[in-house]
Amino acid sequence: MRAGRAVTMPTGQANSLPSVTTPSSVLVLLCTYNELGNLPKLFAEIDRYMPAASILVVDDNSPDGTWQWVQQRQTERPATHLLKRSGKLGLGTALRDGIQWCLDRDFDFLVNLDADLSHDPASIPALVKACQGEQVDVAVGTRYLEGGSSPGLAPHRKLISRMLNSYANRMLRLPLTDCSGSFRCYRVSKLRELNLHDLQCPGYGFLEEILVALKKQGATFTEVPITFDCRYAGKSKLSWKDALGALQVIHRLAFGKTKN
């Protein structure tokens, strides 16, 4: 498969792919800030669809008790890990810290999804199977192909997403329809080829930044249709300020400037 080529995984094809790699080689990454209302249900759903996977929670010292819940969960679910940070430092830095934690250990695949249940954990096996079965480096969950959807999402969130993806597709020429979505599976061996210190974006623009870096390393991509819904509990943290920041990052990436 040529570097940068996107291969869409049609709805229902996941069942025909080879079985998922050894579950213990999969790490599920969750970046959290005040997600206590979502984690019990989210963990239960992850265990339903990928029961032997390890879970890493990168928490920015949530005042609602998120990290304390994860600590307690570690006593009941041994393959649960917590990386507690000093405060709210940005999604991009949380993802980078989580990826580095993964690279320091022995995993084959890293799956990232939002911790608010806007991403359905039922799609985790399809993303992992797509990566393994197609022998690609990144499987991206998309709302914008047949079989994907975003029911119940607030109009302003849909507008922000459409704006970011339209601009990213035009400027970055990534072979993807959903560049700003965080529901992805990465092949860890490909992530090891990156210099994470070169990824400088602290916010949502990191989602495009890492795709560009992987493309430069010759990564191959596929897409899997997913459902992106409104969060289960709590308030959305995505604002117009975040969207504008991501647009600025995309602009800088397009013109070869990575400093944020």
Image: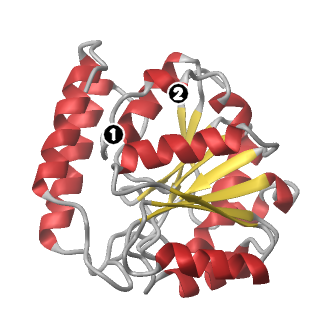
Locate the N terminus by quadrant: top right
Q: Residue furthest right?
A: 22
Q: Which residue is mark 1?
A: 202
138 vs 15: above or below? above
129 vs 53: above or below? above
Q: Which residue is mark 2?
A: 196
Q: Quadrant of residue 224?
A: bottom right
Residue in the foreground of this view, choosing between 204 and 69: 69
Report whether residue 233 is seen: yes
Instruction: Give the residue at x 63% y 31%.
Output: 191
Q: Amino acid at mark 1?
A: Pro
Q: Quadrant of residue 24?
A: bottom right
Instruction: Give the residue at x 30% y 40%.
Output: 205
Scheme by which the image is coloured = secondary structure
Residue in the foreground of this view, choosing between 207 and 166: 207
Residue in the foreground of this view, choosing between 26 and 199: 199
Q: Quadrant of residue 106?
A: top right
Q: Earlier in the sequence, mark 2 or mark 1?
A: 2
Q: Secondary structure at mark 2?
A: helix
Q: Secondary structure at mark 1?
A: loop
Report whether residue 19 is seen: no
Q: Amino acid at mark 2?
A: Leu
| Percent x, y of residue 227 | 44, 70
Classify 10 Å Cα crowding around label 1: few (below 14), some (14-19), many (20 and above).
some
Instruction: Give the residue at x 72% y 47%.
Output: 109
Mark pair 2, 1: CA separation: 12 Å
